[in-house]
Image (cartoon, grey):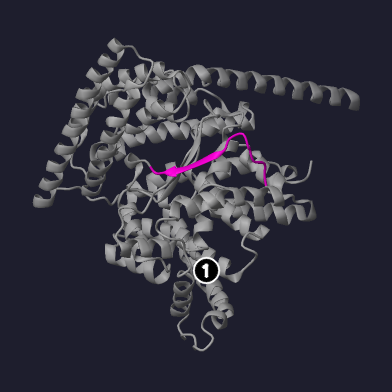
Amino acid sequence: MLIRRLLLSLCLLLTLATARANDDAAFGKAFGDDWLAQYWQYNPDYAISVGYYKVAGLLPVPDAAGRKAYLRWLDSQIKRLAGFDVAQLSPAARSDLAMLKTQLESERWSLTTLKSWQWNPSAYNVAEPIAILLSTPYAPEPERLRTVQQRLLKVPAYYAAAKKAVEHPTREYTRIAIEQSAGALDVLGASLEQQVAGSALNAKQRTAFLAALKPARAAVTDYIEWLKALDAKQAADGSARSFRLGDALYEQKFAYDIQSGSTGKALYERALAEKERLHARMAVLADQLWPKYFAEQKPPADRVQKIAQLIAKLSEQHTTREGFVDEVKRQIPLLEAFVREKDLLTQDASRPLQVRETPIYQRGFSIASINAPGPYDPTAKTYYNVSPLDDYTPEQAESFLREYNRWQLQVLNIHEAVPGHYVQLLHANKSPSRIKTLFGNGAMVEGWAVYSEKMMLEAGWGGHEPEMELIHSKWLLRVTTNTLLDYGIHVLNWDEQKVLDLIRNEAFQSETEARGKWRRATLSQVQLTSYFAGYSAIYDYRERLKKELGARFDLKQFHEHFLSYGSAPVAVIESLMKPEDATKP
């Protein structure tokens, strides 16, 4: 009787496994490569950014008809997803479905509720996809130039539709659109003509290319002039839209973007507590370091003043304005060697990182960023964009260099490059789930970069110097205050002075950094919270596993398995990883 029950149970398990495999196969077929091919038809710019070039010649006109058609398609795909019984899917397929559903619903919400296509003129820019096509050798140069030509032919209609779409924009987005559109003219400028002249295109093809280029340039120029006139009108009559989202829109966007299961308000309250914890730890470090730097001077009684004075002293040690980009280049191989020496996670020497000056069309938002290839073209170059200080006054440059001093520049390079964004995105491209890689979660991506800083210092980067810990604590304080100021600006209506006071006086950041952060917060919503949200979730998860596994916990295995799930939300990764994944095999 017992044997019979065991056989029946085994048969039932086999039947369930077979059914689940069949449902997984059905989901994979419905939302696999063929489905993605449809998605790329509507989103060719994003397709190019991830290395999918089959639609590279497409440039959809951003008009009402196009938005309406895309909404119909989104609705149909959300309905298709609802047809699957998630209980019958494996955990991996179930998480793919959930991520895809969130992605499509978020896009629908953006089109119908947020409507940033109306108030963000900087969303309309043809530069980056064209720059990628021109510089990425995915095909022979003549073929790539012909593809660019197809796009150029559509540029006038594209900007004509953009002018009709823009309605009641924010002044902040209007002004950065003017700045970045000038970068688009640079991409379509003399260097492109030289590339065409030196290419294998024949004379007739070169003539046709230049004939398409001229009206495209004119369309960009016309858009810039139109934006300048719009900006002048807004300055005169105060008709610009407020850049603040307000509570309802903010919380909706937070739910879609962060995917933590919590709220923006709850994260704001946690950040307040973290700010206090960091101040307390920094006061201890300041007491430890004070005699070394101020041997003959009594420290201030106020802990914030004491911390600020010591940080100001340390900030005197920095690179030069002229040597800033070169210093970034110098540090990358040192970081890579340290990760190998400590065996923290696998790197890929066949995919080297190339440090470059940030292209003009990408400037104005952050000082450093990563341009990584997607899973369709994983062998393409990864660029670490670093903005030179050419446009800074001497005072601005000094302020910036004090902010990115000897210690903080190292933290920045860990965050952006090794083992932060650059390494994480290399791992993401090797994930078996394209959905998890293509529709990744910003909080996981930014959270990993912040976590990697903490992990590197724990492993001994910086020699456990209290100076490094103090400056890194300052960096973590910036991560924390990013959440405070983002929520404060968009929900609590903080003004510029309150934000600047927080950044300068409680987060110990420089004047240039403070004003740059205010600008950034007026040009983004929720994104600044992703650092603290993701970092907190990853670190909490790791510490829980360490406590559960004790001596069996293996840091490298934790990193390898965690990164194997692409850029999925941390909560999704937690649901898929098993405790034994963080132990030696």
Does 415 sit above or below residue 54? below
Q: Position of residue 65 (x, y in %)?
A: 25, 22
Magenta stretch: dominant SS?
A: loop
Q: Quadrant of the C terminus?
A: top right
Which residue is at 57% across, 53% downward? 451
Q: Is residue 386 visible?
A: yes
Quick check: 546 left or right of 270? right
Q: Where is residue 572 in the image (x, y as percent from the top left)?
A: 58, 40
Locate residue 131: give its quadrant: top left
Q: Quick one: 338 or 74, which is closer to the camera?
A: 338
354 inside magenta stretch: yes
Quick check: 553 left or right of 384? right
Does 38 sit above or below residue 136? above
Q: Where is residue 97 in the image (x, y as percent from the top left)?
A: 53, 29
Q: Is mark 1 on a helix, strand or loop?
A: helix
Q: In which quarter of the image is the N terminus?
A: top right
Q: Can residue 188 be seen in this view?
A: no
Which residue is at 66% across, 60% downward? 460
Which residue is at 57% across, 38% downward? 352
Q: Which amino acid does label 1 sit on?
A: Leu
- The residue to which callout 1 is attached is 278
Locate residue 511: give its quadrant: bottom left
Which residue is at 59% across, 79% downward? 288
414 inside magenta stretch: no
Q: Quick one: 387 or 53, which is closer to the camera?
A: 387
Quick check: 109 left or right of 327? left
Q: Where is residue 487 in the image (x, y as percent from the top left)?
A: 37, 56
Residue range of the region highlighted in magenta in the rendering: 345-358
